[in-house]
Image: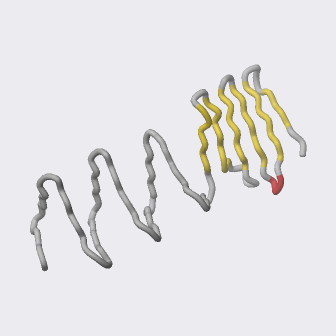
């Protein structure tokens, strides 16, 4: 494998390292900014790592991403956002818990709460309010 290095001006430098199966690693340095790209055979960037003063920033691109571990998997961040363009599913073979120290809000075109076996229990420290065009009980 041969490594190629190019300098476009005094501050910017790019290095390309060919990998197996036609893929390559492209490292670009521009001033204090350094970025590593994993390029696929078709020339698309599949993995980008930006080296910033605050730490690395990781971006993935491709047909899919699967993370599989035998032990615990944890995410911890100041803010977490998950968006599914077509749909979003969360499932488990065990218990499921949602907990918020602040206000919890749920919104959707239609909402359904179903217990396939067992009770549905609603508990409030204060009032329970049901507002609707019609509130039906035992229908």
- Residue 9's image quarter? top right
Classify 45 as above or below 72. Answer: above
Residue 134 rendering spot, x and y as whole percentages:
9, 68
Classify 62 as above or below 77. Answer: below
Residue lying at the far right in this picture: please name it: 1
Q: Is residue 116 visible?
A: yes
Residue lying at 83% horizontally and 46% vertically, measured from the top left:
18
- Residue 72's image quarter? bottom right
Residue lying at 70% horizontally and 39% vertically, measured from the top left:
36
Q: Is residue 65 left or right of residue 116?
A: right
Q: How is the image coloured?
A: secondary structure
Q: Is residue 64 visible?
A: no
Classify 52 as above or below 101. Answer: above
Q: Is residue 90 left or right of residue 103?
A: right
Residue 132 rendering spot, x and y as whole percentages:
12, 63
Q: Is residue 74 left or right of residue 2?
A: left
Q: Nearer the viewer, residue 67 or 100?
A: 100
Residue 137 rendering spot, x and y as whole percentages:
11, 74
Q: Is residue 23 left or right of residue 64?
A: right
Q: Quadrant of the C terminus?
A: bottom left
Q: Nearer the viewer, residue 111 or 76?
A: 76
Residue lying at 79% horizontally and 35% vertically, measured from the top left:
15
**Count of number-bearing discs:** 0
Q: Nearer the viewer, residue 4 or 90?
A: 90
Residue lying at 66% horizontally and 24% vertically, measured from the top left:
32
Residue 46 rendering spot, x and y as whole percentages:
66, 50
- Residue 119's image quarter? bottom left
């Amino acid at each position: 494998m041969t490594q190629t290095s190019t300098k476009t001006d005094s501050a910017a430098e790019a290095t390309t390292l060919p990998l197996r199966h036609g893929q390559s690693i492209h490292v670009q340095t521009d001033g204090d900014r350094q970025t590593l790209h994993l390029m696929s055979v078709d020339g698309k960037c599949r993995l980008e790592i930006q080296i910033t003063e605050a730490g690395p920033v990781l971006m993935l691109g491709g047909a899919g991403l699967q993370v599989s571990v035998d032990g615990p998997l944890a995410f911890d961040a100041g803010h977490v956002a998950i968006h599914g363009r077509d749909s979003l599913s969360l499932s488990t073979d065990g218990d499921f818990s949602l907990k918020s120290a602040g206000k919890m809000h749920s919104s959707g075109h239609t909402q359904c709460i179903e217990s396939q076996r067992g009770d549905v229990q609603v508990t409030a420290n204060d009032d329970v309010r049901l507002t609707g065009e019609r509130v039906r009980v035992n229908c």
